[in-house]
Each structure stands twice: as structure tokens, then as C-alpha cells.
Image: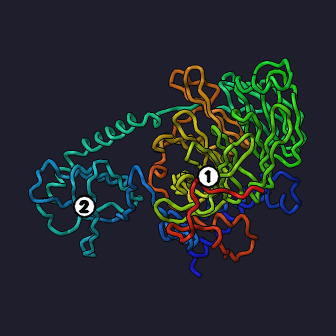
Amino acid sequence: MSARTSAALEIRKLRKKLRQIENLERKDRDLTDEELIKITKKQTLREKLLELLATSGENDDEFTESTKSDLSSKQSYEYSYEEPVPKVDISNIEVTVVTNADEEEDDIVNVDIDEDDVDIHVAVTTQEEVTISNDASQGETTEKNLSNSSDTIRFDVSPREPLHQANTQPSTKKEKVQKATKKNTKETKVSEKAVDKDRNLSNPWRTKVFSVFELEGHNDLVTAADIRKTTLVTASRDTTIRTWDIVKRQEIRSYGGHTGTVTCVVLLSEDDSKSIGKFLETEAEGSLIISGSTDCSVKIWSAETGEILRSTYTYNPVTRLVYHPVAQVVLTASDGGKIDVWSVESGENVQSLRAFDDCVTGLQVSNKLVYASSSEGTIKVFETRESELVCIFESENIQAERGGILTERHIRGFYANDELIYYGDDGINIKVLNWKTGKVRKLPNHCEDFGVTDCIVRHNQCLLSSAYSLDSGLGYVNIREFIGEKYLTSLNDTDTERVISLCCTMAPDGALIVVTAGMQLKVWTEVNNNQRHKDYYHVKANYNVKLNIQALDSDVESDFESSQSDDENDSFNQSDKRRESGSSNTQKGWTSWCNII
């Protein structure tokens, strides 16, 4: 076995162990001594992984492919906004340009060669054929066609020996290029700045700056967050609920009453609070809070006084909770796959159905429809009929829109809007399911090869999603246009851990406020140069080109590593977990019915 292959296997093994540790850290139970020992090795394993990635050159295509499963070699290509620039090894070479004989001298490609950093800038203004040739003694050439391009293309070359001209007599065209290069070096650099300026004008998100402030108060993992105007409510594994004034960056109140992890929390609007309040016979004013916990209870609180107005025993640990204003019911989901419907008027259970075989991970209401997802990778859509749920869609035979592979994974991030369902999992992409057609397309959500998408939310005309890098242990937030789904920017302070809850609001002055929750509770507030506060640190929005290209399939093996043992044998059978476009299975349409148990 070569050293390169051995390093690739070691990297896969380390990633597997890190994923297992991530899952252990989120377990809502007392860990065994053996599991605690595994967690203590997390930092050491990550440091070893990063060292291997740095020394083994994983960025090389050959090595990157060797770290992935053969089963993921088939890639799913989706539409893209910008085509990626192909990587070309141009070390120790000479660059010449061949143009058509009838082209004017003004159309010559400008090539700026700086021997200090060995960067080559090629500003393409017409359709040319660029010939990249090795030293003349080798006599080998490689040609690259750059067609229909008006953007500046930058080839980055690691510093090595300075580039030398070939010893052959240059052609007339080559002499013109060399003269034009010296004459127009400054013009090329000015052109690059102009292009960057134009891009910033077309995408103002690239120049936005955010202040970042960490709220302190919870003693453990923050599991959920919700926000209305400037009031933030958070739930935690420390069994408490807290409200915050995010403009003043201060805690308002702490609510104690649950005896287990508070897994979900909803801050109701004033109208919904009044609607529910009339059934509770309370004089409490202001907004109400609904919370669910692993202690098998749902509680309704007065946000203003902290009083528990109603507590309902659910018989099952609650994983998700949502209020249905049209039907005036509260829906709860459990780790056993059940969805229960509770009347807000009487507090009684009006329906209990076994929706999934495993934990319910997503629950959302939109008009008369209820959307739900599970840890087994299944999505269902229900219609509300007289306060009861009737299943009208199940993602049994969904297919990739443009070919490729779909793998059923633990669904984590979940957002639904009419016929479109956005969901994230233990892969690097966001999947967009049109449940009426059964077709799925992908949006890239990670710059890394291995990642997790825990949250997807919409705020006005923006779609926000969390991203977590397994290799670095850091998280960030990606922002897209909701209509068109064009990537805009990312929020990354290189100090944020995994984000498992995400919410947004607008400040009184119209600035965007993003709240990220996990082991850290952070408030990201859009600011201008005159609003920078000396007590907060500021980060500039970060534009990642990799998130604006065609989506590729996630590495399949990484999805199953968390469920495998530490055995070095990484083989597995996934025939029942993967779907390929063109399957002979009968497609299940949006009018299909589910079995209700």
C-alpha cells in the first residue's frame, strides 16, 4: 500500500471517529465512561486530521478522490451561476497566445507575469486559444480553450523557480504579446479592480460588515431559538428557557419548570397569543411562549411574567413543536416517530399518529399543510382536515432532477414553502424537493468535502443555512436569495462552533440581525462604518466562490460512518438507501396517500 493511499485511509478513519464524537456530544442522556473517554480525544483527533490534510496535499485531485468512497464517484451536476475555473498546473512553463490572423492588435490578450509571487493574470476580451507550453527542451504542449468569457481569470501558481522564456525564436505574434504585456500591466490591474468593483455593486452583500456579540447565561447546549422583533427566546439542555433583548444585548428573564432538556421553543405573535390566551383564562398580557422537552411535557408560558399557564403531559419526549393558527392546535413530535395534535382550547389530545419509524426531526406549518421530516431521511406532507392530519405525500420514490444520486440521510435542517421543501442533512448540499413532482435538485452549502447542514430558515427574501465543517470543527452561515436561490455571502468569524439553531429579525433601523445557537449563542448585527462599537468585534461578509458553482454529490461513505463501528472494514450495504435518476420504481405523486397508524 502506497503512503498516499495509507494517508487517505487514515483521514477517512479520523473523520469517522470525529463524526461519532459529534453524535455523542448531542446525546440527551448520561454518557458511559467509554463514551466520555472518546470525547476527550476529540481535539487530538482533529489536530491529527488537519496535520494529515496539510502534509498530504488533499487538494490534489488524485488524493482527494482517494479519500472518498468509490460509490460517490458519480456526480450530480446541477445548474450553476458561474462556471468554475479549471485547475491547470502551469509551473515552470511559458505562456503564449495564438489569435486569429484577422484580429486587431488591440484585441491581444494581456499577460501579467510577476516573478515574485509567480501569479499569471489573463484578461480575456475575445474568443482566443491560449497555448501553455513547457520548456522548449521538452517540446510538449497543452492547449486550453477559453470561450465566450469576459471575466478576468486568475491562475495561481505556488512559488517555485522563476519562469524562463524558451530558447526558440519567438513568433511575430509572441513579440506583440510580450510588448503588450509590459505596456498594459497597469491597465490589467486596473481592469481587475474595476471588475471587483462591478461585482460588489451587483452584490452589495460582499461589502457588508457585522458586529458579533456572544450572549452568556445558559450553562449547556442551546438547542432552539426563536425571535419576534427584538425579543429572542432560547431553550437549552440545562432545562431552562431564557428571553433576551438583542438590541440591548441583555437577558430579560429566565424560566424554570422543565426537568429535562428543552428541545423546542416558539415565541408566539401578539395575535396568536391573544387567541390562545382567551382559552387559558389568564390576565397575563404580552406574548406567550410554548416549549417542549424530553421530560414529556409541553408548557405555555407568559413571556412577561414567567408564569406557566398550562402544562400538558405528552407521554413521549418532545423533539419538535409548532402552533397551527388555522386549526388552533399545537402539534408535537417525538423521538419515536409520532405526531400528536393538541387542542389549545381544552388541552386534550385530538389525534395521535405514527408518522415515521424513527425520530421526527422537522415540523412546520404553512396554511393548511403540515410538513415533517425524520432521522431516517423521509419527508411527509399532511393536510389538516377538521383538526386532524391526513398524509398526502411521502418521499418514497423521489428522484434527482438532472440525474445523479440521492442518499437517504438523517434530515436536520428543514424549511418548507408551498410546493418546495428545503432540507439539509449529513451531506454537503441543501436539497430542494418539489413534493408535487417528486423531483430534487441540490444547492452547494459547504466549501469542504465533509459537512453537516443543521438549520435552514427564511427571512424576507433571503434563505439562510448553517454549515459545519467536520475537519475544522467550525460553523458558518450561508445566505442566498430566496427567489432564484443565488448565493450572496457567508457569515464566518472563524470562531463559531456548530450551529444547531438559527433565526433572524430586523433591527429598528432596518439592519439584519442573525442569531446562531449551539454551544455558543451569538448575535450578528449588520452595521455601517459609523456604527462600529469598540466593545464588539466585527467581521466582513465572506464570499465563497465554491458555493456559487454546480452542486456535486456528497461523499456517500461519510453518511454511514457514524453508524459503523470503529472496525477498519468500511464496507457497507446501501442498496436500500440510495436512489438513482431513472429508477424503475413507480413515482409517487403529490396526491398519493400515506398509511396512517
Residue holding disc 1: 424
Displayed quadrant of residue 55:
bottom right
Q: Residue at 53% of width from left, 41% of height from top?
A: 479
Q: Is residue 288 above or below residue 575?
A: above
Element assignment for label 2? strand
x and y percent of residue 152 in the render?
A: 31, 48
The earlier-in-sequence mark between 2 and 1 is 2
Q: Where residue 566 appears, x then y in whole percent?
A: 75, 70
Which amino acid type is marked by label 2?
Val
Q: Element type at marker 1?
A: strand
Asked if residue 123 can be seen in this view, the reply is: yes
Answer with left or right where residue 453 lies relative to residue 321: left
Q: For the residues marked 2 and 1, what is the alpha-carbon distance in whole angstroms? A: 41 Å
Residue 576 pos. (x, y %): 65, 70
Q: Which residue is mark 2?
A: 130
Identify residue type, mark 1.
Gly
Q: Number of labelled discs?
A: 2
Give the residue at x 65% y 50%.
Answer: 381
